[in-house]
Amino acid sequence: MLARAKEQVAAFMDPILSINDISNIIVSICRSAVQEQTAIPLHEAEKDSSCSVTHVLQYSGVIPQQIAAYITTMFQCTGLATTLSGEDSIMSWAQAVFDAWLPHSSTITFITSGSTGEPTHQKLETVLLWQEAEELAQALLQKRKRIVATVPCHHLYGFLFTVLLPKVSALPCVAPLPFPSRAFVNGLHLGDFVVSFPLFWEGLLKQEIVFPDDVHGSTSTAPCPPATMHSLLASGLARLTNIYGSSETGGLGYQHHPEAPLTLFAFWRRVHLDDPDESWIERIHPSGTSQQPVAMPDHVEWFSSRCFSVRGRKDKIVQVGGLNVSLSRTVECMRSHPDILDCAVRLMRPEEGNRLKAFVIPKTSEVDMQALRSDLYSWCRSQLRPAERPKKITFGSRFPVTSMGKNKDWN
């Protein structure tokens, strides 16, 4: 059995991606960069990989060097970044990146969005990515005829579901305009599997649509409220699968119904059951070996060795002035102020300083913001240590989010 596992791993010596795949990833990076900068949609030329990168990015304010830095980081060939010219075509970039990646094609580096702090780089083995895609195909794609993508393929979720899953399942993958509209729903077919995220699903619900028969979907990147899942099912979606995981671990489990527990993916297993404070799991490599155990990213309750539910997020501890600081403690203090509806707290970026900053949503827009800011600073001084107090407070009516609905940094 171990010999067979080694043969399977050996089969992955060839790259799991083609030059065309890397071309699509470059376009995905361009599209996301443009969406972060402007409401102008990416140029129609994105559909033609013979167009230059500069032409695709025109009028957006995004420069080709940003795209070059991202794609060469992802494929571990950063020395190539300065040689990629914006006047060259997307396909020529893809060819150059593919050739430079070949000696390192056993890994791919994914850059997190920085939803809880500074963006980080996660270098993942391609054999593990393929292993996860195979498990996803078995769990999700029975009797499916087509994969419909609404997520960028350069992030881990989109990469697994819209780049690798079509390869594993031999299903076609289409990417219509990712806008939650009646036109999007009208373009769905019986047997489709829609890869999306909570903000997009909620946008569809606002259209008061009815789904075609036998359409399944997935949701990830952020928690999907049970009420949203129930509403989608009531609107005719045949099944919606919630994917649970993290950028550091990849997928950990899934649930096909909001009231059902999560099922641990088969390549994970529980270990260190005698630890009363942490839930530990270890991944089984395709070679059959066990990897280093990792703690579950959230507090969970186990119902069996394979089934669990998430019971709450773990506290985020950061270093401020050499002291460990609980972001949750600062958030709870500020939320307890009678004029505050909600708030988020994070570390400043290096260019901003080395203290905490807060984004605050007041209960009413009628409040005097200058007076409230002064009162909040006093409130925090009376209850928090100096390192726990935000040095800068920003007000707004809603938290800043990315185009996929994930929390993002604020200026």
Image: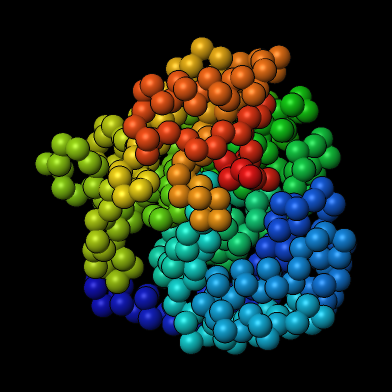
Residue plotted at (87% across, 61% down) = 59
What is the quadrant of residue 404 in the picture? top right
Q: Which of 159 and 164 is in front in this view?
A: 159
Q: Which of 50 and 381 is in front in this view?
A: 381
In the picture provided, is 122 more to the left or to the right than 165? left
- In this view, 401 is above or below 311: below
In the picture provided, is 332 more to the left or to the right than 194? left
Spot occupied by residue 328 in the image (x, y as percentages of width and height): 39, 32
- In this view, 64 is above or below 293: below
Spot occupied by residue 213 in the image (x, y as percentages of width and height): 69, 35
Q: Can residue 290 be seen in this view?
A: yes
Which residue is at the far left? 274
Which residue is at the far top? 338
Residue plotted at (67% across, 26% down) = 397
Q: Can residue 160 be seen in this view?
A: no
Spot occupied by residue 175 in the image (x, y as percentages of width and height): 73, 55
Spot occupied by residue 153 in the image (x, y as percentages of width and height): 63, 60
Residue plotted at (27% across, 34% down) = 302
Residue plotted at (53% across, 28% down) = 343
Q: In which quarter of the image is the N terminus?
A: bottom left
Q: Which of 92 and 20 is in front in this view?
A: 92
- In this view, 278 is above or below 125: above
- In this view, 361 is above or below 138: above
